[in-house]
Amino acid sequence: AQSVTQPDIHITVSEGASLELRCNYSYGATPYLFWYVQSPGQGLQLLLKYFSGDTLVQGIKGFEAEFKRSQSSFNLRKPSVHWSDAAEYFCAVDSRGAGNMLTFGGGTRLMVKP
Amino acid sequence: ETGVTQTPRHLVMGMTNKKSLKCEQHLGHNAMYWYKQSAKKPLELMFVYNFKEQTENNSVPSRFSPECPNSSHLFLHLHTLQPEDSALYLCASSQGHRGYEQYFGPGTRLTVT
């Protein structure tokens, strides 16, 4: 069965610093890949997605992610973090099988220091 | 209303009560989903509906009963729940059921007493 691992449960960065959130997946073929963000009391909002093509994808709010097939990774990055980026971030994988079945990682909670 | 809406936003119920959660999507999508989000656990897919037909039941206990009368509305009927069922229940929709991103509602925070 496919699985998604986000190794960092909590990350704290200073405002203005760069950010990288890690995501590794376990699946034989190249799946569809997503990053979602969840603010407290809210649902999940899509930041970006990778289906095919250029392995560096741009998303909303200045985020980007890079798909690395050899490492089965899809890490999320932002060059300069803003206080409003404090939230929980989820990586998700769609196996491209029958049905749109998303498997989510456990999430990374980001805290931003002033 | 835009996007995916869920009502109520908060619900407290006893173990012997019957209640329903409602989800409505205003995006013209064809697929709808129920997820359970518990503290310290990954999001769990519960049910998937595509064109009103249930295509996935992820081994969910029968005390949770979904209903999808049309492509815009999704319900989750609850009865004789357990305290461990307390969680945030998220509804989502997507244009199709393969290769499309899902759009999420704000969730219903359920507390079972």
Image (cartoon, helix red, strand yellow):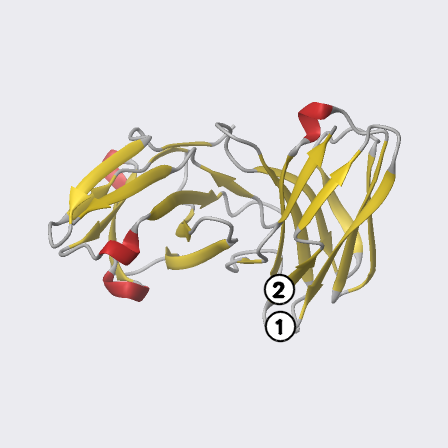
According to the image, label 2 marks what residue?
B4
Spatial CA distance of label 2 from label 1 is: 8 Å
User: In this orientation, which residue lies closer to the viewer: B4 or A26?
Assistant: B4
| Disc on res. B51 | none
Q: Can residue A102 be spotted in the picture? A: yes
Of the pair A24 and B2, the residue shown nearer to us? B2
**Chain ID at mark 1:** B
Q: Quadrant of the N terminus of chain B?
A: bottom right
- Report the residue that reaches farthest toward the left: A17
Amino acid type, residue under disc 2 in the picture: Val
Where B57 falls versus B80 (above or below)? below
From what the image shows, is residue B87 above or below residue B30? above
- In the rendered image, residue B18, in percent from the top left (x then y), is placed at 88, 39
Q: Nearer the viewer, residue A56 or A77?
A: A77
Q: Decide: few, some or many residues near mark 2? Use Cα within 10 Å; few <14, some 14-19, many ≥20.
A: many
Camera-nearest label, 2 or 1: 2
Q: Quadrant of residue A72?
A: top left
Whether tag 2 and tag 1 are in contact, CB under 8 A, the answer is yes
Q: Which residue is mark 1?
A: B27
Position of residue A72 relative to residue B27, above or below, is: above
Camera sees residue A55: no
Residue B4: x %, y % from top left: 62, 64
| Secondary structure beneath label 2 | strand
Who's the residue at 71% across and 24% down the image? B83
Q: Residue at x 52, y 28 (%)?
A: A1
